[in-house]
């Protein structure tokens, strides 16, 4: 098969992955909604439905004094839809991987040389991390949101960021591209799970703080807290490695290992945010809500480093163009 | 002590100092300082910065665009955020806070390692993991021995007390934590040392020309406080050729594919030049002084003759690229031309586009090279002080013109134009390429690399190694005996299952009926750190 054919197959696989992910998201969304709607009073259905769109809201939590409380101890019935959702997620990952692989073969290099490919690879990392942890009930509840982020990223990738498969500019021809960017992608994938759990935690914690056990279908704040910590604890050393590998590459390409280029600066900001999160975990006055916020801010910095810095700020990394 | 007498009660007391220190080294402050550090790093990425390589002209341009805001931002150090005192204040405070926290902690670790493992809580069944079994009296000491050897085999520190067997493992976690934090200090030393002793320079070299590593040969040289200019690594190099390949077709037409600089290098004062290829990501390294290809462009070779047909200037002139397709601008100066000095400014186009109103280049490679110039005559003002080689001072110059219209020069390589009023001629001989070399010498980079490795290893150890304690106790009552086993994680993560499995299989042959009780999520918060 020629490189052009491979590139076409890559695009097709990505399109198929998007469709399959979308179906997976529908299945998972219905499953999650069922958790929320388990034994609702008729009057509450509307509120819960409206709240579902924007995520678990405090309004419905306030109204709920009875109903299905979901904790780590009480696993919900493994519905057919949920299983179907997970299977579709797995199929999506397979198609997504095939898309990335053929893209790499078409270009004859690691498939993360421009924004389109990076988005493709990073969203795959997020989906793989999700799939690897799908056995945890708490992760299954959050799966719909992670798949949502993956779909959003893929949608952006194929519409706005798309670039045809081609060779790299000389400054990117280095095995450090493989190492440095792969680490950033892996770290980013795990941070995504941490981010979704952090946002869920912030809603859940608020609801729990207001008294009653909320009927929002979410795992307990304690479970989410452990999930966030687990994700960040794994992702942080990987991110650290990505930054160090980037510095080594920079030394080899530009003659200095750190030059406060906007990309470097935002990698540093991301690193410091997550370092602050890990320290906050060990500080009574910061643990919990404030720590979760640090995780959210860290993920925002990660996203800004990719989209904001590449699109709006000019710097030495500008060639990673659209 | 303050020179001005202060009221006794206002003078900071010992207690006040202690409170300040305690606050500074507390984890709470560390987290706040980390947040502040992240926040403080933001403006440097949004505003142009001095000394950041991508665009040296960005800061002056900002002053032109924002004449009122610029000076105020400058006063706050916002154009040199990462060298600003307030930025330094944050990370130095963070460093002090960190040391104040980490050093006592390592002292505690040292004492911990030397002391006996801690005694277990009165009720082992309230620990995170717990098992108990009935045991025959004569097997008690065997059970203790079996557990001890199982724990020792798992590399626990084991201490056998009269009542209980105590074991602890995972000190490497603390050691990793310590290593991680100290590595930050080492990193700062490496960065600082490099900044004190190293240097950075830039030099433009045209094909066929050379460069010798002495201060005067640099176009731009940033020396550090302690850089010894006499100690620059002695070497010289010649740029034999610079090969560039651009994508001729495909979606990214005009994208560079190859930048290969062939250079001959002579080390020291010795003879014997070595030829190597320098390209992006593959710098030339001469004993730690590295030369990087960071840019390139065209240097049209121009010869100017004056009214008496004397050659007044001849050679390659560097034209700086101004767009993606290497449309470049530059000036040619011939101050000694007779009867008056001559100067030219204009653009060079590697592939001059046809049929466009403005002169633009359509492709980065040399497909239809053309140079477009306008000329000036008069006093170039070179005796009045130093001038940029890229600008001409037009205050004492008049534009060359024919019939009251500016005289326009448009030449392809090999062509010559006669200047008006018999002032001489200008010949466009050929086009050479030039390469921007970035030269860097940073003796601190090995220290920084070492620190980075220590940082990564320490961090990984401190996050992944579980620190935990186990206790085995035998409780005798009314003729029967029970073995109690309890384990507790000292970190946020729960105990790894392998410990319990190992202990169970070691004890299994010695025990009677088991009465299991595995407690999860029931931990002593105070036991953990």
Image: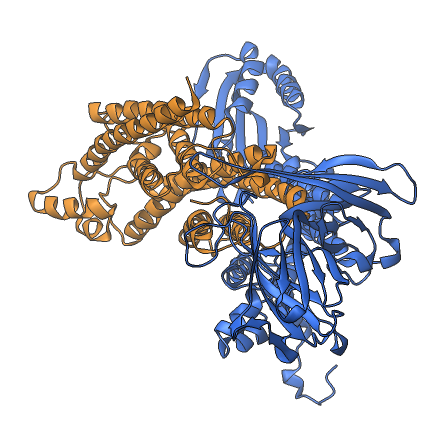
Chain colours: A orange, B blue
Q: Position of residue A150 (x, y in %)?
A: 34, 37
Q: Nearer the viewer, residue A59 or A6?
A: A6
Q: How many marks can you see? A: 0
The outermost residue toward the left is A42
x 52%, y 57%: residue: B38
Q: Nearer the viewer, residue B198 or B154?
A: B198
Q: Residue B110: in sight, yes or no?
A: yes
- Position of residue A172 relative to residue A12, above or below, is below
x 49%, y 76%: residue: B69
Image quarter of residue A78? top left
Image quarter of residue A40? top left
- Position of residue B179 relative to residue B485, above or below, is below
Q: Position of residue B260 (x, y in %)?
A: 66, 38
Q: Residue B120: in sight, yes or no?
A: no
- Position of residue B22 relative to residue A133, above or below, is below
x 50%, y 33%: residue: A167
Q: Nearer the viewer, residue B510 or B190?
A: B190
Q: Position of residue B419 (x, y in %)?
A: 63, 65
The outermost residue toward the right is B270
Q: Quadrant of the C terminus of chain A?
A: top left
x 35%, y 23%: residue: A9
Q: Quadrant of the N terminus of chain A?
A: top left
Tell me if A311 is positioned left or right of B71 in this view: left
Q: Nearer the viewer, residue A169 or A43?
A: A169
Q: Position of residue B360 (x, y in %)?
A: 48, 54
Tell me if B474 is positioned left or right of A198 in this view: right
């Amino acid at each position: 098969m020629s490189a052009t054919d491979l590139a076409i197959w890559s695009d097709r696989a990505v399109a198929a992955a998007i469709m399959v992910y979308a179906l997976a998201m529908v299945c998972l969304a219905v499953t999650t909604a069922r958790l929320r709607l388990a034994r609702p009073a008729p009057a509450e259905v509307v509120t819960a439905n409206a709240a579902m769109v924007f995520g678990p809201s405090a309004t419905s939590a306030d109204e709920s004094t009875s109903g299905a409380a979901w904790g780590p101890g009480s696993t919900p019935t493994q519905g057919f839809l949920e299983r179907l959702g997970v299977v579709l997620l797995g199929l999506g990952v397979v198609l997504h991987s095939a898309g990335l692989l053929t893209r790499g073969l078409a270009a004859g290099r690691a498939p993360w040389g421009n924004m389109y490919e990076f988005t493709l690879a990073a969203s795959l990392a997020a989906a793989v991390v999700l799939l690897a942890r799908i056995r945890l009930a708490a992760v299954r509840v959050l799966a719909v949101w992670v798949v949502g982020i993956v779909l959003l990223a893929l949608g952006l990738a194929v519409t706005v960021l798309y670039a045809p498969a081609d060779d790299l500019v000389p400054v990117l021809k280095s095995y450090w591209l493989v190492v440095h960017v792969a680490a950033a992608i892996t770290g980013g994938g795990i941070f995504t799970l941490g981010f979704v759990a952090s946002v869920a935690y912030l809603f859940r914690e608020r609801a729990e703080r207001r008294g009653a056990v909320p009927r929002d279908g979410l795992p307990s704040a304690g479970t989410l807290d452990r999930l966030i910590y687990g994700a960040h604890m794994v992702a942080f050393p990987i991110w650290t490695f990505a930054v160090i590998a980037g510095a080594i590459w920079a030394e080899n390409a530009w003659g200095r290992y750190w030059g406060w280029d906007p990309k470097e600066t935002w990698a540093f900001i991301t690193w410091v945010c997550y370092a602050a999160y890990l320290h906050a975990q060990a500080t009574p006055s910061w643990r919990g809500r404030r720590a979760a916020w640090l995780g959210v801010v860290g993920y925002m910095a990660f996203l800004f480093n990719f989209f904001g810095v590449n699109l709006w700020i000019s710097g030495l990394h500008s060639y990673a163009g659209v | 002590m303050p020179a001005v007498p202060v009221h006794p009660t206002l003078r900071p007391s010992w207690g006040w100092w202690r409170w300040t220190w305690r606050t500074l080294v507390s984890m709470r402050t560390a987290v706040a300082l980390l947040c502040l550090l992240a926040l403080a790093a933001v403006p440097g990425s949004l505003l142009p910065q001095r000394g950041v390589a991508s665009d040296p002209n960005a800061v002056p341009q900002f002053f032109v665009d924002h004449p009122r805001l610029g000076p105020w931002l400058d006063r706050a150090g916002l154009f040199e955020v990462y060298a600003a005192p307030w930025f330094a204040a944050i990370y130095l405070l963070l460093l002090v806070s960190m040391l104040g926290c980490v050093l006592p902690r390592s002292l505690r670790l040292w004492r911990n390692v030397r002391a006996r493992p801690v005694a277990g809580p009165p009720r082992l069944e309230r620990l995170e993991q717990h098992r108990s079994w009935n045991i025959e009296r004569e097997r008690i000491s065997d059970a203790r021995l079996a557990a001890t050897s199982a724990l020792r085999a798992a590399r626990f520190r084991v201490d056998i007390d009269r009542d209980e067997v105590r074991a602890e493992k995972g000190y490497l976690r603390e050691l990793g934590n310590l290593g991680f934090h100290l590595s930050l200090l080492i990193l700062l030393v490496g960065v600082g040392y490099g900044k004190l002793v190293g240097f950075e320079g830039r030099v433009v070299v045209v094909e066929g020309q050379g460069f010798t590593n002495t201060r005067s040969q640099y176009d731009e040289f940033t020396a550090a406080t302690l850089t010894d200019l006499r100690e620059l690594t002695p070497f010289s190099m010649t740029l034999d050729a610079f090969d560039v390949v651009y994508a001729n077709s495909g979606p990214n037409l005009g994208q560079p594919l190859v930048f290969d600089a062939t250079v001959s290098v002579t080390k020291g004062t010795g003879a014997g030049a070595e030829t190597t290829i320098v390209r992006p990501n593959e710098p030339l390294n001469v004993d730690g002084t590295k030369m990087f290809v960071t840019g390139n462009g065209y240097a049209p070779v121009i010869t100017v003759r004056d009214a008496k047909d004397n050659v007044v200037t001849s050679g390659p002139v560097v034209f700086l690229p101004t767009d993606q397709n290497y449309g470049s601008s530059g000036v040619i100066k011939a101050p000694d031309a007779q009867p008056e000095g001559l100067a030219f400014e204009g653009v060079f186009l590697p592939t001059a586009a046809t049929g466009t109103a403005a002169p633009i280049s359509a492709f980065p490679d040399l497909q239809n090279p053309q140079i477009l110039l306008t000329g000036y005559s008069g006093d170039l003002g070179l005796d009045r002080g130093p001038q940029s080689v890229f600008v001409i001072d037009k205050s004492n110059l008049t534009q060359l013109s024919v019939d009251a219209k500016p005289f326009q020069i448009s030449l392809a390589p090999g062509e010559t134009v006669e200047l008006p009023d018999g002032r001489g001629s200008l010949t466009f001989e050929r086009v050479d390429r030039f390469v921007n070399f970035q030269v860097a010498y940073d003796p601190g980079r090995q220290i920084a690399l070492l620190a980075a490795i220590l940082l990564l290893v320490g961090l990984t150890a401190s996050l992944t190694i579980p620190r935990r304690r186990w206790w085995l106790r035998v409780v005798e009552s009314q003729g029967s005996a029970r073995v109690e086993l309890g384990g507790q994680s000292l970190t946020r993560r729960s105990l790894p299952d392998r410990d319990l499995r190992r202990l169970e299989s070691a004890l299994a042959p010695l025990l009677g009926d088991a009465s299991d009780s595995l407690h999860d999520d029931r931990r002593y918060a105070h036991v953990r750190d």
